Amino acid sequence: MTLEELAALRVNQLEAKFRAEKKAYRPPTMQFTPAPHFAIEWTIQLPIPPSVNDWKTPIVRGPKPTMILTKAYRDWREKAHAAFDAFKVNGPLLRGPLEIAVTFRFATIASDIDGPLKPLLDAANGHLWVDDSHVCRIASVEKLLAGPNEAPHVVLNVRSYRSGGEDWDAEIVKRLAKSKRKAT
């Protein structure tokens, strides 16, 4: 059995379970309202992180050089952690599947767009989400110029398909299957 056939079988099983649960738990007088597409959606503004090319520096200790984090990156990461922790306000860490959209507002157009992305995602580990491996989709990465009275910054938009540690619910799996059918 191919991976596509297994996925289709699982979608069918979850759709049947969803229909059965919906019929079993919905009183006849109550109208069913589907859950929103995203369980959580957050937008966070941070300073621009150092580029991935500038966040580690080699030092020589013994026969082999070791890479350590630069002071600029450590200072930025500390600010980012404080922003993530203040924004999350004692809520649970997000778990996948997560979708993010990133907008960098640079001081100059010559800035590299992919260099600051990895440090940004890594800084959120353990503070906003469990691990950046839970990010399943990067919806967009935009590069814009900061305005004349605006400091360079990054806007991180995080969307979670679910809010806790439970398995994907049938509604999300059904929507993903529909989007795959439309693509083919």
Image (cartoon, helix red, strand yellow):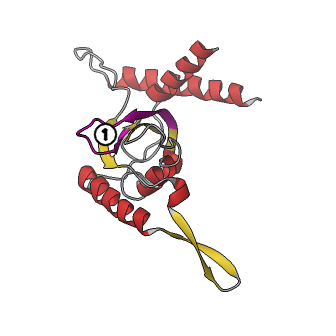
Prevailing secondary structure of the magenta residues: strand
Say if the magenta span includes residue 163.
Answer: no
Above/below status of 154 relative to 83: above
| Residue 119 percent across, percent down from the top left | 47, 54
Q: Quadrant of residue 159?
A: top left
The quarter of the picture where the N terminus appears is top right
Q: Quadrant of residue 32?
A: top left
Q: Quadrant of residue 39?
A: top left
- Residue depicted at 65% across the width and 76% down the height: 65
Above/below status of 121 relative to 4: below
Above/below status of 120 relative to 148: below
User: For mark 1, what is the residue?
Assistant: 42
Along the line of sight, which residue is nearer the eye, 17 or 157? 157
- Residue depicted at 65% across the width and 14% down the height: 184
Along the line of sight, which residue is nearer the eye, 183 or 142? 142
| Residue 5 percent across, percent down from the top left | 70, 25
- Residue depicted at 47% across the width and 68% down the height: 70
Most extreme residue toward the bottom, as rendered?
A: 62
Residue 100 appears left or right of 63 = left
Residue range in magenta is: 137-157
Specify few, some or many for label 1: CA neighbours under 10 Å numbering under 14, 14-19, or 20 or more.
few
| Residue 43 percent across, percent down from the top left | 30, 39
Helix, strand or loop at label 1? It is: strand
Say if the magenta span includes residue 139.
Answer: yes
Q: Amino acid at mark 1?
A: Trp
